Image (cartoon, rainbow, N blue to C red):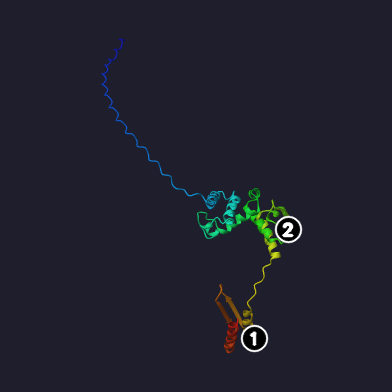
Amino acid sequence: MPPKKPYPVKPLKPLKPVKPLKPLKPVKPVKPLKPLKPMPTKPLTGLDRETQKILALKEEIGQRFWELGQCLIRVHDQRLYSPGFDSFERYLGRRGVNISKPTAYRMMDVARNFSRFIARKHGQTKLLAAIDLTRATPEDDRPVDVLAYQIEVRESGKVSQKTFTKASSREIKLAANRIKRKYNPKPKPLKPTWQLQAQRAVRAIAPKAKLQIKMGAGRDPEVKLTLSGVPQSKLREALIRLTQVVSGA
């Protein structure tokens, strides 16, 4: 076979001359920024410092409620809230604190009566139950003394004893309620004397008469009287007697 002819190689085109670069424009010097005028700051007061701590501790209220209670105690006892606020309760509702009065006083009770170690070990709910138990007992014990108590627990009709550490918050609360009922029984509400007199006066005229009395609330309550079971012949006499008893009350 005859040898293949080589492909013809085309000559390269001459390169175009490179255009010279334009000279860079000189950069204008940047004007220096004017120094900021320092803002006038008021010196922090004792209330400002405690408020900052309270706002920071609110984010960790589950673990650091004891420290939060200590801050609230200082604001309350040292009256740091005045003269900006009329009372401690007004301070709690304003200034961004937004803590209800019962919650604030509960945390203050725990912080007053227990150490930080005990507070973190047992938690706020259980220690509040311990305070309730101390107040229910007739002895002059301190809340911290409850830690050595044997808590009476009743389950399925059986009575047993548990240490404070093993007892739950609910069991401690139930024990406190039983002691309250034992030493401070609620008195039965007594009916006003005029109500008994009115019922006796109506029944003296008509033995089968029924008088229902409903008292409203407030200092000057409304009174609703419902009279039934009185014969028509004795109705006038019953109303006159009833009016005499009520007006004389």
- x, y percent for residue 11: 26, 16
Q: Position of residue 78 (x, y in %)?
A: 58, 55
On screen, residue 18 above or below 45: above
Q: Circle 2 sits on which residue?
A: 158
Residue occupying the point 57% across, 79% down: 225
Which numbered disc, 2 or 1, marks the residue that appears first in the sequence? 2
Q: Give SS at disc 1.
A: helix
Residue closer to the observer: 63 or 114: 114
Give 27 or 101, whichever is nearer the viewer. 27
Q: Quadrant of residue 143?
A: bottom right
Residues under labels 2 and 1: Cα distance? 52 Å
Label annotation for residue 204 = 1
Question: Picture coordinates of residue 57 (x, y %)?
Answer: 56, 49
Q: Considering the numbered disc 2 on the image, is that residue within a helix, a strand or a loop?
A: strand
Please state which amino acid type lies under the numbered disc 1: Ala
Amino acid on which the number 2 mark rests in the picture = Lys
For label 1, count other residues whose C-alpha is less than 10 Å away and answer few (under 14), some (14-19) or many (20+): few
